[in-house]
Image: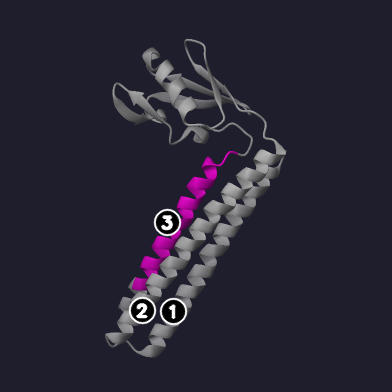
């Protein structure tokens, strides 16, 4: 197989790996009933006029399976952190005791679990769409190589390998979704 085809395959694999990694990150953000510091990822706090990620102004830990503890590095940040958590609309109610912020994570209702499964499925579908787009782009790059003089049989072999890559990464997406769905539905 020539180097140009190998380059297209390597690039497609790298991009597909990134798509699956992105899915993993998004699925971690979908709450599964247990308290996890990752639930608060993406929350931005007003830190002296600058929007700053929560994990850069406080420690976020789990006290137990249902409680998150946010300990700001500066006492003055208690109120802005509390407001940022409320504004994030995560269905969490922060409690400020003057030193730390405790967040009791409510148990999930059956209806909420089903909504979370839908969200997880949506994230997985987005990842699969990305994979199919990457497959299309790789196949187009291979077709261009064929126009530039690469033998047709090598291009066909490259397209087959792109399809195998796509199938492999789609299966990884399905596996991640299956694990997350089980985690969400486990009471």
Magenta region:
8-31
Q: Secondary structure at mark 2?
A: helix
Residue ID at (27%, 85%): 148
Q: Label 2 to label 3, Cα distance in Å?
A: 21 Å
71 in relation to 156, above or below: above
Confirm or deny contact between disc 2 and disc 3 (CB under 8 A).
no
Marking on residue 18: 3
Q: Residue 142: within the magenta?
A: no
Circle on res. 159: 1
Is 17 situated above or below 137?
Answer: above
Earlier sequence position, callout 2 versus callout 3: 3
Residues at marks 2 and 1, CA–CA distance in whole angstroms: 7 Å
Image vertical order of residue 183 relative to residue 39, above or below: below
Tell me the element at label 1.
Answer: helix
Judging depth in this view, the residue of 36 and 118 nearest the camera is 118
Q: Which mark is residue 142?
A: 2
Quarter assignment of residue 178: bottom right
- Asked whether the residues under the numbered discs 2 and 1 touch, taking CB atoms below 8 Å apart as contact, a structural biologist would say yes
């Amino acid at each position: 197989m020539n180097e140009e085809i190998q380059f297209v395959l390597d690039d497609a694999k790298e991009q597909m790996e990134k798509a699956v990694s992105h899915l993993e990150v998004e699925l971690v953000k979908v709450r599964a009933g247990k308290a996890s510091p990752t639930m608060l990822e993406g929350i931005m706090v007003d830190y002296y006029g600058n929007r700053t990620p929560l994990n850069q102004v406080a420690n976020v830990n789990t006290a137990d399976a249902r409680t998150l503890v946010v300990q700001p590095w500066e006492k003055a940040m208690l109120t802005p952190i509390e407001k940022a958590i409320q504004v994030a609309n995560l269905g969490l109610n922060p409690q400020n005791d003057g030193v730390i912020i405790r967040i009791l994570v409510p148990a999930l209702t059956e209806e909420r679990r089903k909504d979370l499964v839908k969200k997880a499925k949506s994230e997985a579908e987005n990842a699969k769409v990305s994979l199919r787009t990457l497959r299309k782009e790789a196949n187009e790059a291979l077709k261009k190589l064929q126009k530039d003089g690469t033998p047709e049989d090598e291009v066909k072999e490259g397209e087959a390998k792109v399809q195998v890559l796509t199938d492999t990464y789609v299966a990884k997406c399905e596996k991640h979704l299956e694990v997350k769905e089980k985690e969400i539905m486990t009471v």
